[in-house]
Image: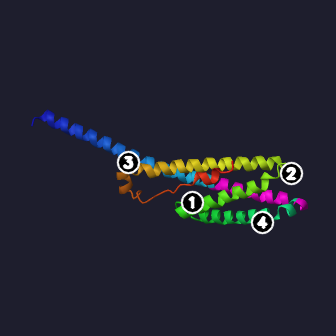
Amino acid sequence: MDQSRIWLVGGCSLALGIILFCVMAGSYTSLWRTQNRINTIRGYLLDDCDAQVAAARDLIKEISGSTALKEAHREQIDILANRVSQAQNTLAEIRKSEAIMTREQVLGLDQVMAGLKTDILALTRDRADGLDKRLANRLKEIQGDLLGMVRKYNDEADYFNERKTVFPGFLVAKWFSLDEIQYPQFEISLLSTGQ
């Protein structure tokens, strides 16, 4: 083999090696950035859940301030108060763990926040005349923010879970043990009912 062919093969091999390294490094950083976005969105999502719980407590206080309203809606207030307690417990459990939310935690949060929304709607639906407009607008805004964060979380979780199954992501995921990580998704239909 002459010298020029050796240089050509060597140069092509080096170029191919650099390209493969860049593709693999790009895939790894893509997965890493996605995990960071998921963790950031998780924090915002939990903050929005906390805001909805606080708004539900404010709603209970507002209704409890009027004896007539309190008596008329006692059962609904008790149901909402129990749901607020469940939501606080669920959020505290999730915040305690810095790890990825488990499927059970996502389902639990999904159900308790959807139930909280349903209970708030049940309590406010018949009270359009007596409900403080600022509180009503705040409840609607919080629910919109929460739904938006859930959608963003789901998009990023779907992206991460999908990237691990295609080239070169599946190789990178195997090498760095990312293939064991699975981000569960929220059930959008639970949170978007009753808009």
What residue is drawn where x is 73% and y is 66%?
82
Residues at marks 2 and 4, CA–CA distance in whole angstroms? 19 Å
* Residue 9 placement (x, y as % from top left): 19, 38
Question: Would you say residue 172 is visible in this rendering?
Answer: yes
Magenta region = 46-68
Disc 4 and disc 1: Cα gap in Å?
A: 25 Å
Question: Which of the two marks, 2 or 3, is nearer to us in this view?
Answer: 2
Residue 74 image position (x, y, % from top left): 82, 64
Residue in view at x 69 percent, y 50 percent: 194
Which numbered disc covers residue 106? Answer: 1
Q: Residues within 10 Å of mark 1 (few under 14, many from 20)?
A: some
Q: For the residue carrying disc 2, how many other residues have a C-alpha within 10 Å: few (<14), some (14-19), or many (20+)?
A: few
CB-based contact (under 8 Å), mark 1 and mark 2? no
- Describe the element under mark 1 as helix, strand or loop: helix
Q: Which residue is mark 3?
A: 166
> Do the residues bearing badges 3 and 4 touch, measured as CB atoms within 8 Å?
no
Give the left or right position of residue 101, taking residue 174 as reference: right
Instruction: Tell me residue 45's x, y (percent).
Output: 62, 53
Choose the circle earlier in sequence order: 2 or 4: 4
- The residues bearing labels 1 and 2 have C-alpha atoms spaced at a distance of 35 Å
Badge nearest the viewer, 3 or 4: 4
Name the residue rendered at 42%, 49% in the picture: 163
Residue found at x 43% / y 47% = 29
Q: Earlier in the sequence, mark 4 or mark 1?
A: 4
Quadrant (top left/top right/bottom left/bottom right) for the N terminus: top left
Q: Which residue is mark 2?
A: 130
The residue that disc 4 covers is 78
Q: Amino acid at mark 3?
A: Val
Q: Quadrant of residue 98?
A: bottom right
Secondary structure of residue under mark 4: helix
